[in-house]
Image (cartoon, rainbow, N blue to C red):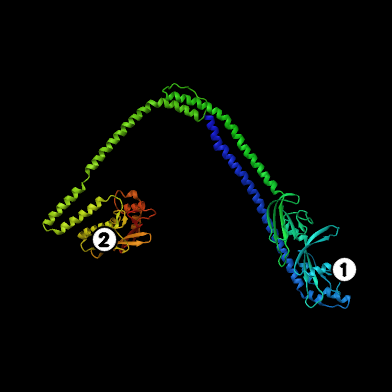
């Protein structure tokens, strides 16, 4: 049974979690590495795309500057009577040479023309013979046209470059020209080839005109990307020499309807991703095999030792304390066996201690019952108190001492409300009537020295609203006893009950002594230390009751100024009886 439980625990708590975490790591590592290479490839594709767009824009601007120049217009519209005159005109046109020297991105700038008086000279090429048909086709197709051109270097090796063809039509002249600007392959290499990623550049459906890994001149066998100006592709694809991570985007040079496609690929990304997977699988296998072998070995040993310990414990529970003297091992089970022997030696003493504890507990319960009876017997019967006050009031009334009779009546009502308060919420109207009763009693004491008034907003239904009992009276009492303790005349206390969007606001304002900042700080500190309240129903009691009963309430707030009085109040929600 123990072996099966240990194996179950091992499978549930170790084998399955390791397998789950390992599978997650396998998938997550693959995804992270793959996504990392994919993001790097996408970023490099954007970089190359920006370079190509910047380059084609620069070449197009150069083309515009040359084709719209007065030198080109003057050359194509002129008539030349002799070869020398034509040569001088061509020598005087230096704009193409100037642009070629200033812009390293160009490998050549040429002007093709069918002008019969002109001949091929440096950057000006005269079109004749079989070239004239192709020349006419370009003239009939105005705009900016990107294509590739095959050239041969000094050692006879062919290479491919990107070129821009732009017909130059001169109004009023029977002769035209075609401006041809070729992009430097070395310039592209210096700008693009700065990492281990492979890049191929293709214009329309023509062969590759630039490649970082020696694919120049080859045609791409890929998805139908041609003539799709916004074509994009991202993923794994069989490309050129094998399976690769591939990123393809297209760009359209300014003022042109041609498309240049940027093929960015990474041949080693998939191998590196597979390598990460293999290492993760190896680590996962080791993490599962080694714990499995260890748990099989030690489960058997542990099971035998636990069985021995269980047998001895059964003997103890049956009342047989004669167990074996030694137990193999030096671990928690051995400590448990030692504790078992200690337990056997202490059973008798424990039984005695438990018996003594039960006796003491019973004595404590009896003593507590006796104290409760004494407390109950010491309480004054409220009905006896009310009847006694009523008897005194009637005697005062029978002797025509109406003021004393009224005072006793007020005190009786005050004590009845106070003693009968259970701590449960009462109606706000009852509380305000209780305050009015308290004010009448204080008026007997202070006569006209202090005037008190209760002000309630008209929209507040005091008999429908519930409030904790005895919250307002201590504040009014505080205004009498502390705010006006030295007042001889013109004392004023105003109890305001105001409506608020979140409930009601109760304020007690007096024009008495007020407090300085030091005394106010002391009062606020005692209010927030309920352990110092010592059973009184003072500001600490009111402050803590409000905070405990009404959620998210800050309790009492105080505004005061020496010699100008004090305003103390609180805000509570508008609760009906059913709330």
Q: Position of residue 462 (x, y in %)?
A: 30, 59
Dot 2 falls on a residue whose secondary structure is: loop
Q: Is residue 280 left or right of residue 553?
A: right
Dot 1 falls on a residue whose secondary structure is: loop
Residue pointed to by mark 1: 129
**Which of 363/167 is in front?**
167
Q: Is residue 75 visible?
A: no
Q: Position of residue 307 (x, y in %)?
A: 50, 26
Q: Quadrant of residue 555?
A: bottom left
Q: Is residue 323 left or right of residue 62?
A: left
Residue pointed to by mark 2: 484
Residue at 70% from the left image edge and 58% from the top image edge: 48
Whichever of labels 1 and 2 marks the residue nearer the N terminus, that label is: 1
| Gap between marks 1 and 2 measured at Cα | 123 Å
* Total marks placed: 2
Rendered position, 302 above or below 37: above
Classify mark 1: residues with Cα within 10 Å, few (<14), some (14-19) or many (20+). few
Checking the image for residue 495, the label placed there is none
Q: Position of residue 44 (x, y in %)?
A: 69, 56
């Amino acid at each position: 049974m123990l072996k099966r439980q240990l194996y179950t625990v091992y499978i549930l708590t170790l084998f399955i979690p390791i397998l789950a975490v390992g599978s997650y790591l396998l998938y997550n590592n693959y995804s992270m590495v793959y996504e990392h290479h994919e993001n790097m490839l996408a970023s490099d594709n954007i970089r190359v795309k920006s370079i190509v767009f910047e380059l084609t824009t620069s070449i197009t601007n150069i083309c515009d500057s040359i084709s719209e120049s007065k030198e080109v217009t003057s050359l194509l519209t002129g008539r030349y009577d002799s070869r020398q005159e034509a040569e001088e005109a061509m020598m005087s046109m230096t704009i193409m040479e100037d642009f070629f020297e200033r812009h390293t991105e160009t490998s050549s700038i040429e002007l093709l023309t069918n002008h019969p008086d002109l001949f091929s000279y440096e950057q000006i090429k005269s079109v004749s013979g079989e070239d004239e048909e192709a020349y006419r086709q370009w003239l009939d197709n105005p705009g900016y046209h990107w294509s590739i051109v095959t050239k041969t270097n000094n050692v006879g090796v062919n290479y491919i470059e990107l070129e821009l063809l732009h017909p130059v039509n001169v109004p009023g002249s029977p002769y035209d020209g075609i401006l041809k600007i070729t992009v430097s392959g070395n310039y592209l290499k210096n700008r693009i080839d700065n990492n281990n990623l492979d890049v191929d550049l293709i214009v329309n459906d023509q062969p590759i005109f630039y490649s970082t890994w020696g694919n120049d001149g080859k045609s791409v066998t890929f998805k139908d990307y041609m003539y799709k100006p916004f074509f994009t592709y991202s993923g794994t694809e069989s490309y050129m020499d094998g399976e690769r991570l591939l990123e393809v985007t297209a760009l359209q040079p300014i003022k042109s309807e041609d498309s240049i496609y940027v093929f960015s690929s990474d041949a080693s990304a998939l191998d590196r991703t597979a390598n990460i997977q293999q290492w993760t699988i190896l680590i996962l296998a080791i993490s599962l095999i080694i714990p499995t072998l260890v748990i099989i070995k030690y489960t058997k040993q542990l099971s035998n030792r636990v069985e021995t310990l269980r047998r001895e414990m059964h003997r103890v529970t049956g009342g047989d304390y004669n167990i074996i003297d030694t137990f193999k091992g030096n671990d928690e089970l051995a400590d448990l066996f030692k504790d078992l022997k200690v337990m056997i030696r202490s059973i008798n003493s424990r039984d005695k201690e438990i018996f003594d504890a039960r006796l003491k507990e019973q004595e404590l319960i009896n003593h507590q019952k006796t104290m409760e009876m004494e407390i109950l017997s010491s309480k004054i019967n409220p009905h006896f108190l009310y009847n006694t006050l009523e008897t005194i009031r009637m005697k005062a009334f029978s002797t025509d001492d109406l003021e004393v009779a009224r005072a006793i009546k007020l005190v009786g009502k005050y004590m009845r409300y106070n003693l009968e308060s259970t701590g449960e919420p009462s109606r706000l109207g009852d509380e305000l009537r209780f305050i009015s009763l308290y004010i009448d009693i204080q008026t007997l004491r202070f006569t006209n020295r202090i005037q008190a008034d209760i002000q309630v907003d008209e929209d507040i239904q005091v008999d429908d609203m519930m409030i904790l009992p005895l919250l307002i009276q201590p504040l009014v009492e505080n205004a009498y006893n502390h705010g006006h303790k030295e007042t001889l005349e013109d004392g004023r206390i105003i109890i305001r009950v105001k409506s608020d969007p979140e409930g009601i606001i109760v304020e007690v304002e007096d024009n008495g002594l007020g407090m300085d900042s030091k005394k106010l700080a002391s009062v606020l500190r005692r209010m927030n230390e309920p352990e110092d309240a010592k059973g009184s129903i003072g500001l600490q009691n009111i402050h803590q009751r409000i905070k405990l009963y009404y959620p998210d309430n800050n309790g009492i707030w105080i505004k005061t100024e020496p010699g100008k009085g004090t305003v103390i109040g609180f805000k509570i929600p508008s609760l009906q009886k059913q709330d």
